């Protein structure tokens, strides 16, 4: 009887956490462009594939793992791009899992010769589920040794799941050196409850931007293979709001191709949470980027050093990103004069 009461209480807490939790986040937010804003679909004016993986708080049992895989393709003749993104997020001991597939479209236009705008849209289908196979009870452990000994005698329904459709929009202004975007996710606020209760998924708003200061270029390669290499400093920010949750990322990237270094702060110091200053983490990035005449490859690793009350004992967060772009246009056709959005690769 006690175990059933304990389990019911745990279930209520888990469901409450699912209702108030925010969407997964990536520290390398510009390395997850289609996740950040559907307006970034086709932003390289080429074809691109990418992967992002994040393991948050690996030192505690209730950690979070998130993976995102995406691809997009730019169609020059109609100034449009299409993309696809698949995200999978697993939270905590109860295995609360969310998988979604999104289809994206964006269109590129020019307001003036020096200012461009890209609107974008996304339609996604979500599948959320819970799995209690990892839960254990006191009766399953030897009281003398503390070792796991017996299977649980508890039986319960573990087939909790929910499928729903989600709508999102975004927009991106850009010049040769600056960019500013806004995205609104979960516009229809679908019911996300896995037990058929009323639990709308809160709308998420994201504002993000920055600029690049291009320095004197360096050089890579030698002889006939020598070419200019980017040298730049790129301050960037992201501010997002969802339900009662607010968060900000503020920092900069230094690119000395093929090396990229990044450092930024996450938190909202002017807004307290439960009487505590909202300082979450310091993020450090080490990246490699190789930009050829046609193809481009970027690989990044970042670590979140926790500065909140959770402390560094949580293990922080490890994040890995990979992207590859290549042209698919007709090489005999003269290219249109287009600006490339100057956002960082990571």
Image (cartoon, rainbow, N blue to C red):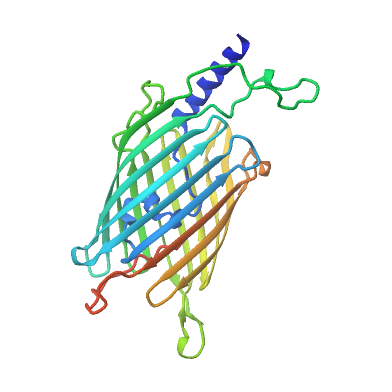
Q: Residue at x 37, y 29 (%)?
A: 162
Classify the position of the N terminus by image quarter: top right
Image coordinates of residue 259 in percent, x first then y, are 54, 70
Image coordinates of residue 221 in percent, x first then y, are 51, 83
Q: Residue at x 54, y 34 (%)?
A: 273
**Quadrant in the rendering for residue 274:** top right
The reply to whether residue 345 is in sight is yes
Quick one: 262 or 2, which is closer to the camera?
2
Quick one: 216 or 297, which is closer to the camera?
297
Judge whether 209 appears above or below 124 on screen.
below
Q: Is residue 346 left or right of residue 125?
A: right
Quick one: 110 or 319, which is closer to the camera?
319
Q: Residue at x 48, y 72 (%)?
A: 290
Q: Is residue 343 left or right of residue 172?
A: right
Q: Is residue 223 left or right of residue 186?
A: right
Image coordinates of residue 141 in percent, x first then y, are 71, 22
The reply to whether residue 269 is in sight is no
Number of marks in the image?
0
Judge whether 133 appears above or below 270 on screen.
above
Q: Residue at x 39, y 26 (%)?
A: 193
Residue closest to the far top:
1
Residue closest to the far right:
144
Residue closest to the far left:
78
Image coordinates of residue 341 in percent, x first then y, are 35, 65
Judge whether 110 appears above or below 164 on screen.
below
**Quadrant in the rendering for residue 30:** bottom left
């Amino acid at each position: 009887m006690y175990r059933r009461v304990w389990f019911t209480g745990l279930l209520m807490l888990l469901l409450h956490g699912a209702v108030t939790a925010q969407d997964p986040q990536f520290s390398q937010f510009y390395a997850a462009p289609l996740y950040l804003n559907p307006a970034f679909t086709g932003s390289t004016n080429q074809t691109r594939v990418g992967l992002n993986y994040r393991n948050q708080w690996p030192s505690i049992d209730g950690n979070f793992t998130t993976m995102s895989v995406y691809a997009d393709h730019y169609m020059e003749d109609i100034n449009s791009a299409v993309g696809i993104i698949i995200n999978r997020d697993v939270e905590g001991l109860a295995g609360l899992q969310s998988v979604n597939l999104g289809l994206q479209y964006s269109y590129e236009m020019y307001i003036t010769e020096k200012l461009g705008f890209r609107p974008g849209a996304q339609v996604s289908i979500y599948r959320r589920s819970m799995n209690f196979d990892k839960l254990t009870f006191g009766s399953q452990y030897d009281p003398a040794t503390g070792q796991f000994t017996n299977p649980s005698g508890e039986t319960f329904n573990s087939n909790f799941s929910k499928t729903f459709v989600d709508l999102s929009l975004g927009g991106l202004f850009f010049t040769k050196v600056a960019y500013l975007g806004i995205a609104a996710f979960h516009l229809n606020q679908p019911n996300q409850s896995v037990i058929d209760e009323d639990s709308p998924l809160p709308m998420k708003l994201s504002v993000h931007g920055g600029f690049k200061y291009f320095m004197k270029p360096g050089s890579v390669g030698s002889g006939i293979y020598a070419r200019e290499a980017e040298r730049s400093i790129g301050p960037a920010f992201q501010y997002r709001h969802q339900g009662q949750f607010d968060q900000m990322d503020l920092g900069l990237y230094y690119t000395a191709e093929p090396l990229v270094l990044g450092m930024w702060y996450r938190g909202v110091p002017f807004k307290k949470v439960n009487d505590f200053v909202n300082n979450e983490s310091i993020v450090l990035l080490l990246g490699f980027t190789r930009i050829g005449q046609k193809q481009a490859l970027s690989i990044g690793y970042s670590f979140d050093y926790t500065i909140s009350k959770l402390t560094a004992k949580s293990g922080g967060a490890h994040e890995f990103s990979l992207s590859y772009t290549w042209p698919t246009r007709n090489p005999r056709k003269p290219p249109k004069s287009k600006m490339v959005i100057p956002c960082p690769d990571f």
